[in-house]
């Protein structure tokens, strides 16, 4: 699936599909990379979703970066996930006993978030980045992503800004 942002996702549809675990990337998915506190709109959404879903943050960033969000939102998280490795996703299953069919990964990068989810064979939802500012390491990922998007656009498979909801 591809959506504008986390607020455009049909969570009711995900629930009807049997999804019960939402795994969010942090930077440029839940918040801008330099935001120290969770935006109110995001916090309101997550608090609403906690009634129907178990929610996690999974980030390549360090624990110090994700801890304020985990505390503020009252959710678990995994730092230093090394996405597109599936290590963090495997850890969630091992600790909680979920089925892959119940899990959804939501993130703004194809070469980390979406590739990790697809390699692990769980539902993935790509969202547009919240901001244009990225971490330095993300610049390389965005370059590679640009090549992939250009290739997919030529094949009429994917186009940035043309949202869809297959799942």
Image (cartoon, rainbow, N blue to C red):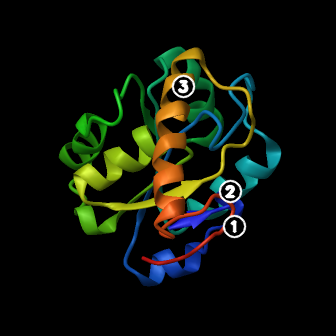
In this view, which residue lies farthest toward the bottom? Answer: 16
Of the image marks 2 and 3, the number of the one nearer the N terminus: 2
At x 24%, y 62%, the residue is: 100
The label on residue 91 is none
Residue 52 on image: x %, y %: 51, 69
Q: Nearer the viewer, mark 1 or mark 3?
A: 3
In which image quadrant can residue 58 be found? top left
- State whether residue 106 appears in this view: no
Q: Nearer the viewer, mark 2 or mark 3?
A: 3
Residue tagged 1 = 8
Circle 2/circle 1 CB separation < 8 Å: yes
Q: Quadrant of residue 127?
A: bottom right
Q: Which residue is label 3 attached to? A: 138
Categorize mark 1 by other alpha carbons within 10 Å: few (<14), some (14-19), many (20+): few
In the image, residue 108 above or below residue 15? above
Label located before the other in sequence (1 or 3): 1
- What is the spatial separation of the Cα atoms under label 1 and label 3, in whole angstroms? 24 Å
Front position in the image: 6 or 151: 151
The residue drawn where x is 48% and y is 30% is 141
Residue drawn at x 72%, y 49% is 42
Is 86 left or right of 126, judged from the image as shown? left
Cα–Cα span, label 2 and label 1? 6 Å
Q: Quadrant of the C terminus?
A: bottom left
Query: Which element type, helix, strand or loop, lies under badge 1?
Result: helix
Measured in 3D between alpha carbons, the distance from the residue under mark 2 to the one under mark 3, in whole angstroms, is 19 Å
Task: Find disc 2 in the rendering and name its residue.
Answer: 5
Q: Residues within 10 Å of mark 2 (few under 14, many from 20)?
A: some
């Amino acid at each position: 699936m591809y959506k504008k942002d986390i607020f455009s996702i049909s969570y009711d549809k995900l629930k009807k599909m049997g999804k019960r675990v939402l795994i969010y990337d942090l930077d440029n998915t839940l918040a801008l990379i330099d935001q120290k506190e969770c935006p109110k709109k995001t916090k309101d959404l997550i608090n609403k979703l906690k009634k129907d879903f178990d929610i996690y943050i999974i980030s390549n960033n360090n624990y110090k970066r994700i801890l304020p969000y985990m505390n503020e939102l009252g959710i678990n998280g995994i730092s230093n996930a090394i996405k597109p490795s599936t290590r963090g996703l495997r850890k969630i299953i091992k600790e909680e006993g979920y089925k892959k069919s119940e899990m959804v990964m939501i993130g703004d990068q194809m070469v980390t978030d979406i590739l990790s989810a697809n390699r692990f064979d769980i539902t993935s939802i790509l969202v547009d980045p919240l901001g244009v500012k990225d971490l330095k390491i993300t610049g390389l990922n965005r370059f590679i992503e640009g090549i992939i998007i250009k290739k997919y656009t030529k094949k009429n498979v994917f186009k940035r800004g043309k949202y869809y909801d297959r799942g």
